[in-house]
């Protein structure tokens, strides 16, 4: 169960060096991996990912208190049909069965998150019963020979800390480092990989700018303050982890878009793509891996107060070397400076924005763009298939994304890449015999694994893939209406049924290869 990766990333990129934005046209040609059997490098890790609030349930058990998501779920109209995570997949009680499921699927790694509100319900005081749950889970994984990959924060801030200002408040970063230290002291002897945050873009900009996610704030200034303090929290937690678990691999997971200008010959479209890329990707990549916020982004948001939050020394803390960078990829998008002919609205990002359709009669919860400066950035839909989320299916974007990160960010610093989330929601059909033959999801994962191998063949140091998700679960503002699982969950009975995609993925993991298309 050893990971072949360096203990620390070598720092070779000069801090503050600007990364030029170079739009590139989508790849359309077939590659050697487009069909046929595709073998992966020896030691490539195969896993699935989940998050505490999405699967655990046991919302008020063993001392757990509210996180911002518990409170947000009570806001009329905020979450589909008022769904919440009180029961979810009941993983808190069924973790043994779920670990056995992973083992039966030949998975060698499990990416899960720990709930800060379970471990430190008031954000500060340790709750030993909460820590115990994760200790039991880790032991169960190790006994099954499944490597635990722990994420400290997958969006569920203790509500007590939100009431003290949440992520826009600088102190939250220090509280997060204290929580990291508690977890490292408890589990550092058994967990070989630790990541600090999952998708800080969502925490900052869906949570504090768009209002689509908890805590539902709608302010460009708060989103940017949250973004910086999430970065600082990451850096301070890295210090706490490095001290306590020096042998472990440490890092962070970011979510990415691939911004393409609708017309690459039109400078205004190229500039819209540059700004979209800056506010989604480079705002986190640059401070972590290059030690500075991008200059063009600082100019774009100069009126929104970000610079006032950045204190001397912060960027040194934030840019401490990381061993692993988790890449979450669902889709990219085409953006333009002009609206789409019919109904273009300035969303300011081509990635998932959390906006959702409502059932008739559902209370309305207004949201705004997650981009603090969305003006003049219009997403345009392309002639691509879409998932049940409405997200475009764009596997070649993953190839370009991984190569770009490798070349501009992770490669120069010796940081290994892992695809820590990728997957698709589709409206599954349960057959009479209870099976789910989800060929659409299977084809989605197949295409993305082929695209991932294209990136490896072209030089990207990608060492593992985690399908989102092990099982259907609570999909945030969309509640239980969207199913991403390789395993179906019947929420009435909590019965798990492996879908066709799950059985196919188990063979991929067992063989370390994607089979030829049938
Ligand atoms: C990601 C989240 C994950 C899940 C997928 C569909 O942004 O990290 O929890 O909701 O999207």
Image (cartoon, helix red, strand yellow):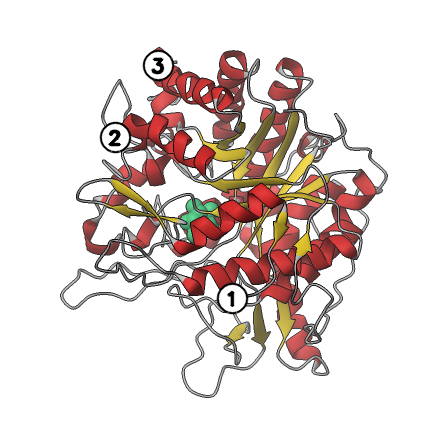
Separation of marks 2 and 1 at Cα, in angstroms: 34 Å
Structural crowding at the residue carrying mark 2, measured as other residues with C-alpha within 10 Å and reported as few (<14), some (14–19) or many (≥20): many
Quickly name the residue at label 3.
Answer: 127
Q: Which of the 4 quarters of the picture holds residue 102? A: top left
Q: Is residue 315 above or below residue 131?
A: below
Which residue in the structure is indicated by mark 2?
Answer: 59
Q: Earlier in the sequence, mark 2 or mark 1?
A: 2
Earlier-in-chain disc, 3 versus 1: 3
Ligand 1: does it lie within 8 Å of the C-beta at label 2?
no
x, y percent for residue 249? 66, 27
- Place residue 295 in its image quadrant: bottom right
Query: Tags 2 and 3 in contact by the CB under 8 Å rule?
Result: no
Identify the disc placed on residue 7. none
**Mark 3–mark 1 contact, CB under 8 Å?**
no
Distance between mark 3 and mark 1 Cα atoms:
41 Å
Secondary element at image label 3 = loop
From what the image shows, is residue 16 above or below residue 153?
below
Q: Position of residue 329 (x, y in %)?
A: 56, 55
The residue lying furthest to the bottom in this view is: 341
> Which of label 3 and label 1 is nearer to you?
3
Residue to which mark 1 is pinned: 348
Quadrant in which the N terminus appears: top right
Ligand 1 has an atom within 8 Å of the beta carbon of the residue at disc 1: no
406 shown above or below 182: below
Q: Secondary structure at mark 1?
A: loop
Farthest left residue in view: 361
Q: Secondary structure at mark 2?
A: loop
Q: Who's the residue at 40% across and 35% down the image?
A: 101
Q: Choose the circle earlier in sequence order: 2 or 3.
A: 2
Between marks 2 and 1 in the image, the one whose residue lies nearer the viewer: 2
Please state the horizontal and vertical placement of residue 217, each as a whole percent of the image: 37, 49
């Amino acid at each position: 169960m050893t990971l072949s990766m360096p203990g620390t990333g070598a720092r070779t990129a000069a801090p503050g060096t600007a990364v030029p934005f170079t739009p590139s046209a989508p790849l359309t040609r077939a590659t050697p991996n487009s069909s046929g059997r595709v073998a992966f490098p020896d030691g490539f890790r195969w896993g699935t990912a989940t998050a505490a609030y999405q699967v655990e349930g046991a919302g008020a058990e063993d001392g757990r208190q509210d996180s911002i998501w518990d409170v947000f779920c009570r806001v009329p109209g905020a979450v589909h049909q008022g769904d919440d995570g009180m029961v979810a997949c009941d993983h808190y009680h069924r973790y043994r069965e779920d670990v056995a499921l992973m083992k039966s699927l030949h998975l060698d790694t499990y990416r899960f998150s720990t709930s800060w509100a379970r471990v430190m319900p008031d954000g500060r005081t340790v709750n030993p019963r909460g820590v115990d749950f994760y200790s039991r889970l880790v032991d169960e994984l190790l006994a099954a020979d499944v490597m635990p990959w722990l994420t400290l924060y997958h969006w569920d801030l203790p509500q007590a800390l939100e009431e003290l200002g949440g992520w826009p408040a600088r102190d939250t970063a220090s509280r997060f480092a204290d929580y990291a230290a508690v977890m490292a002291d408890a589990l550092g002897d058994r967990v070989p990989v630790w990541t600090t945050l999952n998708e800080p873009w969502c925490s900052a900009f869906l949570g504090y700018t768009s209002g689509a996610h908890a805590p539902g704030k709608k302010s460009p200034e708060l989103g940017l303050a949250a973004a910086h303090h999430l970065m600082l929290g990451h850096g301070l937690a890295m210090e706490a982890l490095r001290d306590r678990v020096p042998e472990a691999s440490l890092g962070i997971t970011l979510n990415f878009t691939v911004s393409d200008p609708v017309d690459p010959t039109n400078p205004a479209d190229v500039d819209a793509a540059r700004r979209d890329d800056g506010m989604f990707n480079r705002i986190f990549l640059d401070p972590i891996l290059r030690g500075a916020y991008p200059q063009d982004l600082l100019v774009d948001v100069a009126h929104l107060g970000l610079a006032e939050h950045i204190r001397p020394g912060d960027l040194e803390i934030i840019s401490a070397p990381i061993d692993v960078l988790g890449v979450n990829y669902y889709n990219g998008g085409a953006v333009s400076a002009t609206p789409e002919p019919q109904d273009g609205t300035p969303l300011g990002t081509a990635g998932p924005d959390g906006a959702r359709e409502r059932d008739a009669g559902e209370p309305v919860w207004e949201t705004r763009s997650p981009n603090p400066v969305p003006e003049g950035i219009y997403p345009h839909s392309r002639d691509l298939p879409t998932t049940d989320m409405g997200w475009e299916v764009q596997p070649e974007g993953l190839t370009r994304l991984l190569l770009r990160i490798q070349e501009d960010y992770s490669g120069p610093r010796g940081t290994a890449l892992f695809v820590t989330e990728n997957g698709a929601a589709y409206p599954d059909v349960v057959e009479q015999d209870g099976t789910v033959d989800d060929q659409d999801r299977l084809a989605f994962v197949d295409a993305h694994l082929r695209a991932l191998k294209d990136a490896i063949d072209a030089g990207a140091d990608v060492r593992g893939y985690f399908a989102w998700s092990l099982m259907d679960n609570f999909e945030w503002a969309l509640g239980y209406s969207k199913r991403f699982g390789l395993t179906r969950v019947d929420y009435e009975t909590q019965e798990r049924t492996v879908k066709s995609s799950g059985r196919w993925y188990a063979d991929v993991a067992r063989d370390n290869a994607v089979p030829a298309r049938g």
